[in-house]
Amino acid sequence: MPIHDWTRVGLGTFHAFHVSWVSEIQESLNAGLLPPDYYAQAEQIAGPLGPDVLTLQTNDFPESEMVEGGSAGFGGLAVATAPPRARLTASAEMDDYTLKRRTIVIRHSSGDRIVALLEIVSPGNKSSRHALRSFVEKAAESIYRGWHLLVVDLFPPSPRDPQGIHAAIWREITECKFELPSGEPLTLAAYSVGPSKVAYIEPTAVGRELIEMPLFRQPEIYVKVRLEATYRAAYRGVAQRWKKVLE
């Protein structure tokens, strides 16, 4: 199913779709993509970077996995043998002082550890300079804290993020600039957080299908988030009135 132009409908219509899509992604991750000692759960943290889905690790199992033939034990792929599909990559080094200064130990109320965040950008995140700034700062702070991140932005750049949401986030953690390719204004971006921060970027556009994007749980181990399948499932619930507008 091609990506729709969500600027054609109101905020409430996208919000309703957004909620359904988050639910579908959570169900997909918990239905076998994640290993037994990990789970995905909808928003638990308030603020501009909610996020929509958290990936948490329980304290029930030690982290010990064999990486072989592209597979990293239960529910994982190794970057070295199964690179993510995203066409563009970028990396940034952070000095130890910065990492130590920014790192805060955060635990889920159950005692389980936050591993990764997934955020679907909404129009409200770009509605003002303050809103965008808050979103970008929270995204960068999550990376500093050691949480892997996946950001899905199906809205075109605004005057406040002229090169898209990834460029705005990347400016917070590196001096390197990023420019969107011509004709590809939408952005999918996954961030692997280790000693070196690595971004996997897939510029895209209305009318294209979504690709599977990586959601990291260790710096070199990820699961594929089925964005296309979950988008399609969530779209089935959109009212016919708005489908006519979108299609």
Image: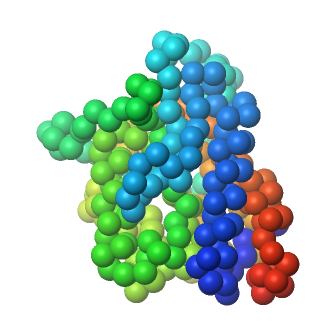
Residue located 53% across and 38% down the image = 55
Q: Which color mode does the image show?
A: rainbow
Instruction: Report if residue 79 is visible in the image.
Output: no
The quarter of the displayed image where residue 245 is located: bottom right
Measuring from the top left, give residue 16's x and y in whole percent.
66, 68
In this view, the residue in front, 162 or 131, is 131
Which image quadrant: the C terminus? bottom right
Residue 236 as seen in the image, left or right of residue 37: right
Residue located 21% across and 43% down the image = 102
In this view, the residue in front, 139 or 72, is 139
Measuring from the top left, give residue 40's x and y in whole percent.
58, 38
Residue 241 as seen in the image, left or right of residue 29: right
In this view, the residue in front, 41 or 182, is 41
Measuring from the top left, give residue 71's x and y in whole percent.
66, 25
Above or below: residue 66 compared with residue 109: above
Residue located 52% across and 66% down the image = 121
Above or below: residue 74 compared with residue 88: above
Which image quadrant: the N terminus? bottom right
Give the number of callouts.
0
Above or below: residue 238 compared with residue 66: below
The quarter of the displayed image where residue 194 is located: top left
Residue 121 as seen in the image, left or right of residue 210: left
The quarter of the displayed image where residue 35 is located: top right
Instruction: Report if residue 153 is visible in the image.
Output: yes
Residue located 40% across and 32% down the image = 109
